[in-house]
Image: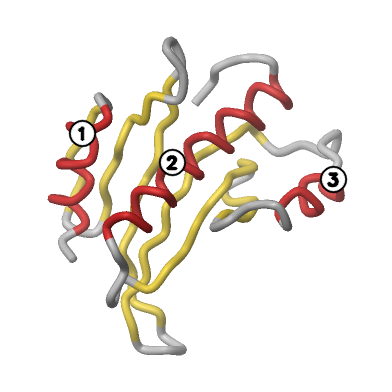
Amino acid sequence: MNLTSFIRKYADQIGGQYIAYDTDHSVIIVPVTSSRFQTVIGTVRENELYKRKLITLSSKITDFNDGINLKPLLEQTTHFNYCRFKIEENFLQIEAVASLDGIKEETLKEMIQEVANLADQYELKLTGADVH
């Protein structure tokens, strides 16, 4: 699957916006409500351990700080279909990861939507604002 062309096409379908980055990274601005949007970054990388290409879809939630209680966030992860929380570059983020081999377009769409919706939900819950 060509991630760039898929995300470009999907952005058109949902009234979002595609931003060109490079062959291994794609950015989609996903509408999550009538007035809110969430940025999702799709990255293709080779998994060294399993020797296969993976797609990672991620979105920033907020700057990480010691005031964020991680236990309830980790407990919430058990209710998600595809996503998990992570801390990267001092940002609390949400991500979904899957093998690029044989992934169905419908599954990828669901993953993008879950990343965007959960990032928006937790961003609002933790910051009270539309930051990312």
* 52 relative to 93 in the view: left or right: left
Q: Quadrant of residue 82?
A: bottom right
Q: Residue at x 58, y 38 (%)?
A: 118
Q: What residue is disc 2 on?
A: 113
Front-most of residues 48 and 118:
118
Camera-nearest residue between 119 and 43 = 119
Residue at 18 percent across and 51 percent down: it is 6
Whichever of labels 2 and 3 marks the residue nearer the N terminus, that label is: 3
Residue 33 in picture, x, y percent from top left: 46, 18
Left or right side of 33 for 129: right
Residue at 70% over, 52% down: 79
Residue type, label 3: Pro
Residue type highlighted by circle 2: Gln
The local secondary structure at tag 2 comes to helix
Crowding at dot 2, Cα within 10 Å, few <14 / some 14-19 / many 20+, comes out as some
CB atoms of marks 1 and 2 within 8 Å: no
**Which residue does the numbered mark 3 point to in the structure image?**
72
